[in-house]
Image: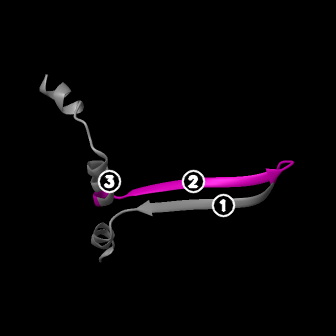
Amino acid sequence: MACEAAEQQDVTLLELLDRLLNKGIVITGDLTISVANIDLIYVGLRLIVTAVETMNRYTES
């Protein structure tokens, strides 16, 4: 019963943003534009969303 109550907690947008910035998230994507099965343009995208403090914590050696 307690487990079900914990799973049904509402998360506000502010809490979600705080969690994402604290942990970090990487979004990747690929886009290929082709004509007649010939690839003309390829775009690779990698987007990193995190707080500066979090990034510094993981990149310090």
Closer to the eye: label 3 or 1: 3
Tell me the residue that label 1 is attached to. 43
The residues colored magenta run: 22-38
Say which residue label 2 marks.
29
- Dot 3: what SS? helix
Q: Amino acid at mark 2?
A: Gly
Query: Badge 1 local density, few (<14 within 10 Å), some, or many (20+)?
Result: few
Residue 41 horizontal side relative to residue 59, left or right:
right
Q: Secondary structure at mark 2?
A: strand
On the image, numbered disc 3 is attached to which residue?
A: 17
Residue for point 30% across, 69% down: 58
Q: Earlier in the sequence, mark 3 or mark 1?
A: 3
Of callouts 3 and 2, the N-terminal one: 3
Residue 8 figure quarter: top left
Dot 2 alpha-carbon crowd within 10 angstroms: few under 14, some 14 to 19, many 20 or more? few
As measured in the structure, the alpha-carbon distance from the residue carrying label 3 to the one carrying label 1 is 28 Å
Q: Residue at 35% across / 58% down in the picture?
A: 24
Foreground residue among 14 and 6: 14
Q: Is residue 13 above or below residue 51?
A: above
